[in-house]
């Protein structure tokens, strides 16, 4: 598919790109953002990538409802309103559709929610499904030629992402975000039973060229962004040879020549721990953290969900190895597998505490559409509703093997035992003992860090319950890890957010 980059002679269109409100959840970080005066954690990368595919003569506006409100005048201005959304944003999507109908403005929708549930949205005019590099040009071609627009544009092919454009980062109000995002690869070589990624993006890992990624870094840099950049790939190390041969050397060179303006985070599989060279190269390129799907310390549960990359290894040892190489590890954990026994709850608690994984996203198992798990449970007549898209809201969309009352009770015990203040700060101390920061620099108390420190002292250190644990931790850090004081402030703020999200006493 040739990338759509021709000048189009038809009417100059006015396009409003709307990103729905993201409800409070583990990854929203809403309660942490207040400490650093940010409005949203990450920008809508999908929408600004789609925006870059429009003809350059078109007028474009972005409304991220996590940053600003959607006004009737915005909708009235537009010829089309483009929406991209995930399951968790359903409620906000309904609001946007209602507002567009009031103004009689045409709606075009895409993204994970609509790719899997477009039949549930009959009031939307057009759907751009699957990967927009293929399906958006179909829509644009019909528009250019004056043909009737189709209801659904879709494909069973996967896009050549070496043809993807640099996202329109200039549409963002960058000061309102805690992170910037880039995407390097699509697809994952693994096939976990509960995950829909391979259905949406395939098992073959496709990677952008090093030149493309450098252009994206240049774009963010020229817009004066400095600080955290999240690589949003579902598995950044899915194609290790290309990563090591081309991309990481280019990123390292770029970072050195620009005096290390960014700090990268990624999502990887745990087999990252098996490759010393890759670990070293990622740390040298500026990566400081990675999210890993641990799921369960139970071998039976890992076998059940086909988590082959986690099997037959000492996962605690793997996590510590990654930490010692200079990458913080956050992790995903799941309870509710058919093979889970009542012992799994304490096993999860022990693993999380011993690993020093500060951001431990523990959720009840859910079955998203288009997963092998969804198909299996459907065949067993165990599905009861659709997944909420939020695996930390104490909901499940199927009938578990374990007694539901016991399962919820055990799940609550995990959350309580890892996120109440005493065990939480104990876990951070364990991390600080394991972790070996690469390219360590002395702490500079800039205005942002100073503001976060003052707010954390006022809210966490003086107002909240558990404040004595906070002060014990801060004093311990001051004496034993003074170079990690900025980390200590950050982790304390994260803890406040997690306790709020999970409904624990703060």
Image (tube, rainbow, N blue to C red):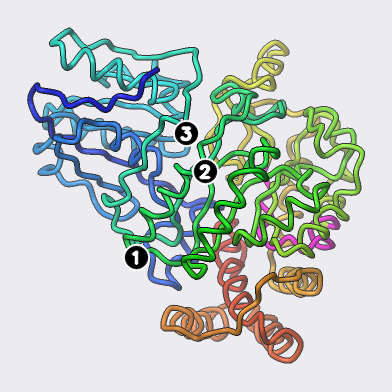
Q: Using the image, determine if residue 79 lies above or below residue 298.
A: above
Q: CA distance from mark 2 to mark 1?
A: 21 Å
Query: Viewer-proximal residue, 100 or 205?
Result: 205
Q: Classify the position of the N terminus by image quarter.
A: top left
Query: Viewer-proximal residue, 251 or 18?
Result: 251
Residue that mark 1 sits on: 224
Residue that mark 2 sits on: 210
Residue that mark 3 sits on: 87
Q: Using the image, determine if residue 115 lies above or below residue 294.
A: above
Q: Using the image, determine if residue 457 lies above or below residue 246.
A: below
Q: Position of residue 258 (x, y in %)?
A: 46, 66
* Marks 2, 3: nearer the viewer: 2
In this picture, which residue range is highlighted in magenta? 350-363
Circles 2 and 3: CB atoms closer than 8 Å: no
Q: Earlier in the sequence, mark 3 or mark 1?
A: 3
Is 358 within the magenta?
yes
Q: Provide the secondary structure element on which disc 2 rests.
A: helix
Label 3 Cα neighbours within 10 Å, binned few <14 / some 14-19 / many ≥20: many
């Amino acid at each position: 598919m040739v990338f759509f980059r021709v000048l189009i002679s038809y009417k100059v269109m006015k396009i409003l790109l709307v990103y729905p409100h993201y409800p409070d959840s583990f990854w929203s970080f809403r309660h942490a953002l207040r400490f650093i005066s940010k409005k949203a954690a990450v920008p809508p990368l999908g929408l600004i990538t789609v925006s870059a595919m429009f003809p350059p003569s078109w007028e474009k506006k972005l409304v991220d409802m996590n940053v600003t409100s959607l006004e009737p005048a915005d909708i009235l201005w537009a010829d089309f309103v483009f929406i991209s959304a995930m399951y968790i944003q359903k409620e906000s999507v309904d609001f946007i559709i209602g507002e567009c109908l009031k103004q009689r403005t045409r709606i075009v929708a895409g993204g994970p929610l609509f790719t899997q549930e477009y039949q549930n949205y009959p009031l939307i005019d057009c759907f751009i499904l699957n990967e927009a590099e293929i399906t958006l040009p179909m829509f644009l071609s019909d528009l250019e030629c004056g043909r009737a627009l189709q209801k659904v544009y879709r494909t069973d092919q996967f896009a050549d992402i070496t043809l993807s454009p640099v996202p329109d980062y200039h549409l963002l109000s960058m000061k309102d975000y805690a992170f910037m995002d880039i995407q390097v690869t699509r697809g994952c070589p693994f096939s976990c039973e509960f995950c829909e990624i391979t259905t949406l993006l395939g098992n073959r890992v496709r990677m952008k060229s090093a030149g493309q990624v450098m252009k994206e870094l240049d774009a963010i840099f020229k817009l004066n962004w400095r600080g955290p950049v999240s690589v949003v790939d579902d598995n950044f190390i899915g194609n290790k040879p290309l990563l090591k041969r081309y991309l990481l050397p280019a990123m390292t060179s770029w970072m050195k020549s620009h005096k290390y303006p960014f700090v990268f985070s990624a999502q990887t599989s745990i087999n990252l721990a098996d490759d010393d060279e890759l670990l070293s190269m990622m740390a040298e390129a500026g990566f400081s953290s990675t999210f890993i799907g641990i799921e369960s310390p139970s071998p039976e549960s890992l076998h059940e969900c086909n988590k082959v990359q986690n099997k037959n290894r000492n996962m605690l040892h793997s996590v510590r190895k990654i930490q010692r190489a200079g990458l913080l590890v956050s992790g995903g954990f799941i309870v509710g597998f058919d093979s889970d026994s009542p012992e799994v709850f304490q096993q999860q608690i022990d693993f999380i505490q011993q690993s020093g994984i500060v951001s431990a996203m523990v959720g009840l198992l859910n079955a998203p559409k288009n997963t092998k798990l969804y198909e299996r449970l459907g065949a067993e007549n165990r599905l009861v509703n659709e997944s909420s898209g939020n695996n930390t809201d104490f909901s499940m969309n199927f009938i578990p093997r374990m007694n539901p009352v016991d399962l919820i009770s055990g799940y609550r015990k995990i959350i309580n035992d890892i996120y109440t203040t005493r065990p939480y700060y104990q876990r951070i101390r364990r991390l600080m003992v394991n972790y070996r920061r690469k390219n360590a620099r002395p702490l500079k108390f800039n205005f942002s860090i100073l503001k976060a420190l003052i707010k954390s002292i006022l809210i966490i250190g003086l107002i909240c319950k558990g404040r004595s644990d906070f002060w014990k931790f801060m004093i311990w850090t001051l004496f034993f890890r003074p170079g990690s004081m900025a980390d200590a402030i950050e982790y304390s703020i994260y803890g406040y957010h997690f306790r709020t999200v999970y409904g624990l006493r703060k």
